[in-house]
Image (tube, rainbow, N blue to C red):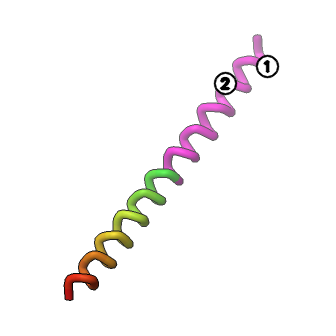
């Protein structure tokens, strides 16, 4: 039971890290797309 609990906590921590990385990555790619679109219109 204790092992399962610690594994669940680890999964939650890794899930949070993955979510933060994904959020930063999506913001980064969206910014790049907006910038390239802006320069294409110039």
Q: CA distance from mark 2 to mark 1?
A: 9 Å
Secondary structure under the numbered disc 2 in the rendered image: helix
Secondary structure under the numbered disc 1 in the rendered image: helix
**Left or right: residue 5 compared with residue 28:** right
Q: Position of residue 2 (x, y in %)?
A: 77, 16
Q: Which mark is residue 8?
A: 2
Q: Position of residue 37 (x, y in %)?
A: 28, 75
- Residue at the top extreme, as displayed: 1
The residue nearer to you, when weighing 10 against 32, is 32
Quarter of the picture containing the N terminus is top right
Q: Residue 36 sits in which quadrant?
A: bottom left
The residue nearer to you, when weighing 1 against 37, is 37
Q: Name which residue lies at 63% across and 40% down.
A: 14
- Residue at the left extreme, as displayed: 42
Quarter of the picture containing the C terminus is bottom left
Q: Which residue is mark 1?
A: 3
In the rendered image, the vertical position of residue 20 relative to residue 24, given as above or below: above
Q: Residue 26 sits in which quadrant?
A: bottom left
The verdict on residue 4 being magenta is yes
**Left or right: residue 7 compared with residue 30:** right
Q: Which mark is residue 18?
A: none
């Amino acid at each position: 039971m204790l092992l399962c609990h610690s594994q669940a906590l680890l999964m939650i921590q890794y899930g949070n890290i993955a979510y933060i990385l994904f959020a930063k990555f999506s913001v980064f790619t969206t910014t790049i797309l907006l910038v390239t679109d802006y320069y294409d219109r110039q």
